Amino acid sequence: MLSFLIKPSSSACNMRCRYCFFEDEAANREKADLGMMTRETAALLIREAMSSPQGKDGVHFAFQGGEPTLMGLPFFQYFTEQAALENQDKRPVSYSIQTNGLALSPAWADFLHDNHFLVGLSLDGLKTIHDELRRDAAGRGTWNRVTKTLALLENRHVEVNLLCVVTSYIAKSPVKVYRALKNLGVNYIQFIPCLDPLEAERGSLRYSLRPADYGRFLCGLFDEWYRDLKNGQYISIRLFDDYVRLAMGLPSGTCATSGRCGGYLVIEGDGSIYPCDFYTLDEWKCGRLGEASLEEIADGPVWRRFTSRSQNHPAACSSCPWENFCGGGCPRDWYEPNGQTENYYCSAFRQFFDYAGERIAGIAASSF
């Protein structure tokens, strides 16, 4: 499977989320905004994808931002139509989009349904927290508008999962947050830990997620999820699904738990290529569409430096009984407090696996 994470609107966004990691990344580049993707660039990407040997088993196009819907619906209509035209080998093609939901309309919902898009909708658990951290460009809360969008998507039978960023605020209330999101009627939820700005000391901001808080959050969240599972109600929490798959001897579904990087290509608005959404920085630019083939870029010095770097796990991993589950965690969480690489959330993961590991193994053994 050949996977792309496309940022067609670069860093442009109609919200001003306080913790936005991509706004911070863009600010740390020589040029923050790489512009809106032209149809010519989109067509070049599609041709490369449909002719690449790596995509013979399928191609996945994921759109993210900034806010990708700022491109407008006609851009996405063009993209899917062009992909169908270029797909002479009838490769399996799938689509997803991560959005804040503010720009979606009934026409958008119909398009997303008809083209089988998986929609990731960002919603931070509780209205008070969401409206504090996820505001629009005018400084207004967005919870009501986003939940209205969710109702629209559900009414049009669009496949939706919810993405909740775990901040210090969210971490205090795992039970309330889980129940609130579950009660919105969506059975697929992702929780991702908040990233501090690149130049900030970890844990130094009001919303920063600290290891002790994250550990308690994961334990509390697992208890609720496990209770529902035992009562016959399965809610997909992506992180827990990954751990169960690993316990079953199956590959992880996400890079954060796989123990290695390099599973997809990031395509910026101007066609620049990066190895990861968390590393769209000048030093990690691998090339640009049209300047080299995808195969040449994936075998280039920057790509090889990035993937080999991710294989050098923190030293503590070698003696950790949970390494096969954690995989060292995401390298973006690695730091060197004493001259030695550590995972910032190592203690949180150890706490969680000590608490829930036996139950995860039991779920795996029951052929979940």
Image (cartoon, rainbow, N blue to C red):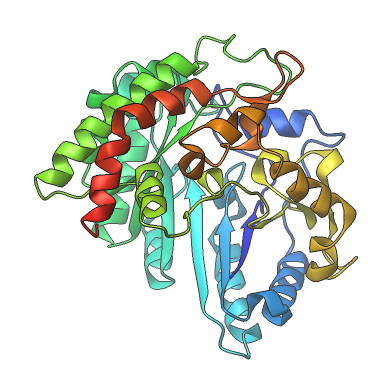
Q: Quadrant of the C terminus?
A: bottom left
| Location of residue 52 with respect to 35 vertically, above or below | below
| Location of residue 145 with respect to 168 vertically, above or below | below
Query: Given the current orientation, which residue lies at the most extreme left position?
Result: 231
| Location of residue 24 with respect to 44 vertically, above or below | above
Q: Is residue 120 left or right of residue 19?
A: left
| Location of residue 356 with respect to 90 vertically, above or below | above
Residue shown at 40% from the left, 43% from the top: 239
Between residues 287 and 32, which one lies in front from this camera angle? Answer: 287
Occupied quadrant, residue 196: top right
Where residue 336 sits in the image (x, y, percent)?
72, 20
Between residues 163 and 79, which one lies in front from this camera angle? Answer: 163
Where residue 15 sits in the image (x, y, percent)?
54, 32
Q: Let me know if residue 35 appears in the view.
A: no
Q: Let me know if residue 119 appears in the view.
A: yes
Where residue 42 sits in the image (x, y, percent)?
71, 67
Q: Is residue 358 left or right of residue 50?
A: left
Where residue 132 sits in the image (x, y, percent)?
42, 18
